[in-house]
Image (spheres, rainbow, N blue to C red):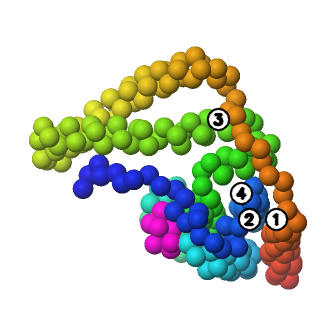
Amino acid sequence: MLLQIGPFTLDVDSNRPTFWQSLMPQTRLLCTLMMVMAIALTPNGEWLTWGIYGAGILGVLLTSQITYWVLLKRLAVEFSFVGVVLLGTLFREGGITLWQWGIFTITTHGLTILGSVSLKAFLSLVLLNFLTLTTSVPALLHALAALKMPPLLVAILASMYRYLAVLIEEFSAMRRAALSRNLMNSRRWQRLVVGNMIGSLFIRSYERGERVHQSMLSRGYTGIPRMAAVPQSRHRDRFIVILTLLFAALGQGIGWYGGGLR
């Protein structure tokens, strides 16, 4: 049904007793960011490198015992937005022309760029969704603080997550009010009601944000969140970080060597 919003939960599998979940949150975050950077910096057309990275990611997914159906649903939703942007990379000049209609031309160069960017986006989204599925948001915030991220940025992220559930609840209340007044009978009325609800929700969220901020200031808030003491990294976590760095370098080295042979 239109406007149906379920419960907002990110860390579905954060409490499972696996090796990945036993690592410290900053270790998981750092390993994920290193792999995302390695994937993003891989030149176009390096299929062997992405195959190595994909095999490594698949191995971690299989051993982490995550809920694959939730991961697939999130990837489907995210790729529905990313796919619109990726489609523009197809019509590039260069290489052999495979199809042409007016100003639209599909070439081998365009297909290479489309496949490369799609693989980069897919592998990066898999890693980021895997991180959020297996690590709670408070743990991620503490990990950002441990990695010396700006405290104000951590405070903004914490507030966004804290009050996102409030906005969803407010939106659900507005939806129930529209249904009780029989305003959702036709598609035309649904579009009109949704537009009005989005505008009203923006105004309500702005006003509530001002009230919450004033309440926080009256209770001594200074703009920097109070973070609990972050535990020190262990030898196992350092080993995993080094192993991830070596794995990323291995993929780049094999891709560079294969490119040199070509």
Task: Say which element carries label 3.
Answer: helix
How far is disc 3 from disc 2 in space, using C-alphas? 24 Å
Q: Which residue is located at x 50 percent, y 74 percent?
A: 68
Q: Name the residue tied to disc 2.
A: 23
Three-letter residue code for mark 2: Leu
Q: Which residue is located at x 63 percent, y 68 percent?
A: 123
Q: Earlier in the sequence, mark 4 or mark 1?
A: 4
How far is disc 1 from disc 2 in space, using C-alphas? 6 Å
Three-letter residue code for mark 4: Pro
Question: In this rendering, would 210 be left or right of 125?
Answer: left
Q: Name the residue tied to disc 4.
A: 25
Q: Are marks 3 and 2 in contact (CB under 8 Å)?
A: no
> Residue 192 location, x and y as percent?
22, 37
Q: Which residues are magenta?
A: 67-74
Residue 237: assigned label: 1
Q: Quadrant of residue 101?
A: bottom left
